[in-house]
Amino acid sequence: MDGAGSSWTQNTDGSLAIRGSGEISKFREVKVDGVTVDPINYTVTEGSTIITFKPEYLKSLSAGNHSFELIWTDGTAATNFTVAENTDQSAKSPKTGEDFSMALCTVLLMVSCAGLAGIFAKRKRNHAR
């Protein structure tokens, strides 16, 4: 089987494809961890039989090793694949169309503080008279 021992990383948008050598006309179902997978969670294409799991389905699987079984009317093929934990620790803000500049906020804070200090100093001078 092509794709045997493949790996997919959690929280990514990629898919996972595994190819079995059976004829597509004899294809019946796919099982992951012994459970039949709903056909809406994968696509089947010709080239023997190529199963491509959709990212939405892969995201529902826990991290770790999973068994995979292709079933045709005249036989089966089995392998394993891994769902790897995403170790990317960098927190990325989603793109909202707005650019946020920390430097601009810092400058505005400093200007505001200077303005307030000036107002209090002037009040103190006027009050002292």
Image: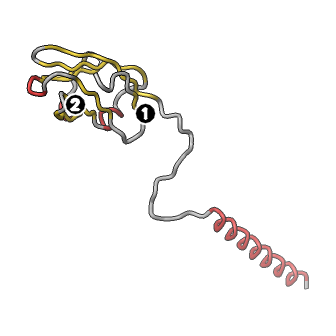
Q: Which residue type carries mark 1?
A: Thr
Residue 80 image position (x, y, % from top left):
34, 19
Residue placed at 33% from the left, 26% from the top?
3
Q: Quadrant of the C terminus?
A: bottom right
- Residue of label 2: 50
Q: Residues within 10 Å of mark 1 (few under 14, many from 20)?
A: some
**Mark 1 secondary-structure assignment:** strand
State the mark number for residue 9: 1
Say few, some or many: other residues with alpha carbon within 10 Å of mark 2 (under 14 / 14 to 19 / 20 or more).
many
For residue 117, side relative to residue 43 (left or right): right
**Gap between marks 2 and 1 measured at Cα:** 20 Å
Residue under the image location 23 percent in, 33 percent down: 42
The colour scheme of the drawn protein is secondary structure
Query: Could you say which quadrant of the image residue 32 lies in?
Result: top left
Would residue 74 appear left or right of 81 to someone viewing this image?
left
Q: Nearer the viewer, residue 123 or 57?
A: 57
- Percent of width and height locating residue 26: 9, 23
Q: Amino acid at mark 2?
A: Ile
- Of labels 2 and 1, the one closer to you: 2
The quadrant where residue 45 appears: top left
Dot 2 or dot 1: first in sequence order is: 1
Residue at 42% x, 25% y is 63
